[in-house]
Amino acid sequence: MIKRILITLLVFHLLAIFQSCCVNEFKFRWDDFDIDILDNSGKIPIITEETNLNKNALGFRISMKILPEGMPMPSIVSFPKIKFISECYATSCDNKWIKQHYLIEIQVITLNDYSDNYPANSDITELFKARKSDETKSDYTSLDNIISIINEQDDAYGGWKFDLFLMDKDAHSGEHIFEIRLKFSDDVEMIKQTATLNLY
């Protein structure tokens, strides 16, 4: 009889361990971003420190960061599959990311005379296409589409990266500085500038 009770308890605890689960909830907002210069002339776009660049191969890698940086301490909300089983038996937890705001606009501003049609301080966003930063030559997409992809992401751990590529060939040769602006749904706007680039 005692042996049967012990076996029953053992089976119960094993089922509890295998069937229970939990969810880690992370509230986050986009807090900052970095700009890397891309050379898109090869098989894949590469980050470069070179400032003399072919305008036909110019790109920017935008690396968005979350607040707080790194993995925040989770608030654990447990949802056991058998409601009388304690969450302490959970063997793994899913991460649920809760956005506090959404990206609504990406802008590229030229701080120099870009071309005859785009003098200094012009919005030249329409001259760019976007692509997820996946180290391939995947198809270009619109900036509106990359915004939708970013806002649909379920996992923000480590931030998110996307690439912008200049699709126009009319840039004046010489020095150029570009300003990237990211606008969010809560009226937050983040602005950063590239280094001075010499386009040819």
Image (tube, rainbow, N blue to C red):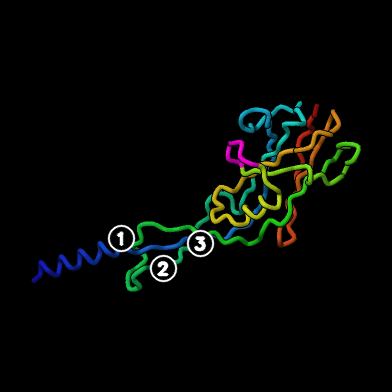
Three-letter amino acid code of the residue under disc 3: Glu
Name the residue at 61% across, 29% down: 43
Distance from disc 1 to disc 3, alpha carbons, whole Å, reads 21 Å
Density class for disc 2 (Cα within 10 Å; few <14, some 14-19, many ≥20) is some
- Name the residue located 61 percent from the left edge and 39 percent from the top edge: 138
From the image, tell me which residue sits under label 1: 18
Left or right of 160? Residue 57 is right
* Segment tinted magenta in the rendering: 133-139
Instruction: Compare marks 2 and 3 and give the one earlier in the sequence.
Output: 3
Judged from the image, the secondary structure of the residue bearing numbered disc 2 is: loop
Q: Assign a secondary structure to mark 1.
A: helix
User: Which numbered marker is on residue 25?
Assistant: 3
Quarter holding the C terminus? Answer: top right
Which residue is painted at 63% across and 31% down in the image? 46
Question: Does dot 3 land on a helix, a strand or a loop?
Answer: strand
Q: Amino acid at mark 1?
A: Phe
Above or below residue 167? Residue 160 is below
Say whether residue 159 is left or right of residue 76.
Answer: right
